[in-house]
Image: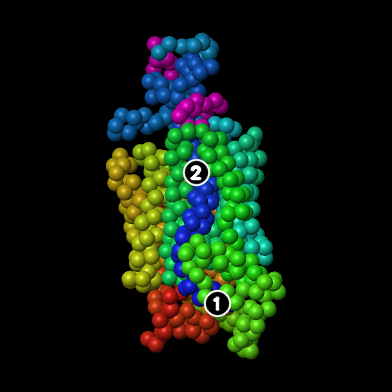
Amino acid sequence: MDFDRVLDEIGEFGKFQLTNYLLICLPVFFGAANSLSYVFTAGVPNYRCFVPNCDDPHQPNYDESWMHYAVPGKTDSNGIFTPEQCKIFIQNNMTMSRGYSVPTFEECSPEMFTSKEDECSRWVFDKSEKTIVEEWSITCMSNHWKLSLVGTMHFLGIVSGSFIFGVLADRYGRKIVLILSILFMSITGIGQALSGDYITFIVFAYLNAVGTSGVYPLAFILGVEMVGRSKREMSGNVLNYFYALGEAAVGLVAWLSGNWVTVQLAVSAPPLLFALYYWIVPESVRWLLAKKHTHKAGRIIKRAAKVNGVVLSDSILATFVDNEDGMSDSKEGMVGQSEKPPSQIAVMKEALKSKTLMIRFVILIYNWITNAFVYYGLSLNSTSLSGNKYLNYALVCLIEIPGYTLAWIAMNKIGRRWSLGLSLLLCAVTCCTGAFIDADLIWAVVSLFLVGKLGITISFSVLYTYSAEMIPTVIRSAGVGALSTMARFGAMMAPFVPLLGLYVKPLPLILFGILSLFGGITAFLFPETLKKKLPDTVEEAENLGKTDNDIELQSSSFKES
């Protein structure tokens, strides 16, 4: 059965679809929040060495007036002193003999300290923020890899879960697997908050990512499969808007609470309520029809028609027989199937022999890895910018909303190739420029950073569409899936980028800029695919951009393919 014909009758995006679509967007909001909660749960708070004979041994204060001569550090142009986290000035022998008495301000004087530095073994943390750094003393450069590992384990979980939930959804249905992934994400996220040690936290961080990996893709599929073809690009964009809002919400919760446990519980506990979706949200009608569950599909379509205020025609009603063997559909499906399509393996072998497609695929791999690396790297690096780190992080997330919108407009106005190339070059220029701007010019640094994130968001959004339009139909899903998997390797490396800034502050942005620059240049080697027929064969894929006789695309999008 042609479900698009049914949608033409009941409405491509009526009240029924709108209600269920908004319900599906809510888990995406929390899925996004869980995907980047580690930015703050494993973030580095302000801390410094404990200073004997100066700090109160029972209730030390992070911000003290005598810090600048007790511990090494830097003073900016505004006179704000930032202490080093793990070094202390050695005290002279006379001071050390006094022991750990509770001092007064007068007792803690410059004369107490020499100019020699030493490592410390006890720290004083800023009380405005508590993360796992303070919880389990993950301090100093020697332990920073443990914080980066949290992000890497997250993306490793995403890789694992994407495959698992994709297979399960095709076999058991979109709705039930979506609900299971949400609940798994919620329970393991709560497990993170209740972890008693670093190892347990890391394990739950991985498992939480496995659950999170199923939320967005399955919600996307459910949402796209319930609306008409002319509304699919719109529905995909709205889902991305909710994702960006979910990411930004983490920064707001962290700002208000200042405690990593509260942050993790806030993003993980509420999704338990989505278990109610089992009785509220319908299964994908397209999946039911594909699995020959005609009667179940019919009940959902009749309910949708009733909610949308539409009376179904007799021809549509007659299609849904009251059985589960789906004979009416199977008979219809026999028409026009005498010609057997080429196998996926055969097309894949043919593509591997094509020099043109292999060069194109290698460039695509580079661009996917670069896009993921820079996209997530900028999000993670936003907390190290000058100014309010919570606000900076939220702005970097929210800039994705205009980014997705501009990508949608640009792809259809100036084409895929120019949209991809120019957006990457925009990211390259702003990142490299931002790397050398005076850190005291906060507005300039943040503005350039935001424009860079805008560029990479546009690029990543275009890349999904562009890649699908260059790969032959039979291997399109497998090809895009392989590229998406390669992108995860870039994402797994991104959490370690902030470590580079500890050695040379501009290095992360310079790295983002150089990689984006090369990606932008190579993007212009691709053929233009705007209004071109989707290639069904290897030969058609090779000839993209070589002829002027390409057939215009119908109203279908890459998402439906």
Mark 1 belongs to which amino acid?
Asp
Pick whichever, 245 or 367, lies toward us: 245
Instruction: Decide if residue 346 is in sight here.
Output: no
Q: How many marks?
A: 2
> Any mark on residue 133, and which?
none
Residue at mark 2: 39
Q: Residue 72, relative to residue 396: is it above or below?
A: above
Q: Residue at x 51, y 85 (%)?
A: 539
Q: Residue 86 at x, y = what percent?
A: 50, 31
As helix, strand or loop, the secondary structure at mark 1 comes to helix
Mark 2 belongs to which amino acid?
Val
As helix, strand or loop, the secondary structure at mark 2 comes to helix
Residue at mark 1: 314
Q: Residue 307 at x, y = what percent?
A: 50, 61
Q: Residue 62, relative to residue 375: is it above or below?
A: above
Q: Residues within 10 Å of mark 2 (few under 14, many from 20)?
A: many
Q: Residues within 10 Å of mark 1 (few under 14, many from 20)?
A: few
Q: Which range is magenta?
A: 106-131
Q: Residue 103, relative to residue 308: is it above or below?
A: above
Q: Residue 441 at x, y = what percent?
A: 29, 42
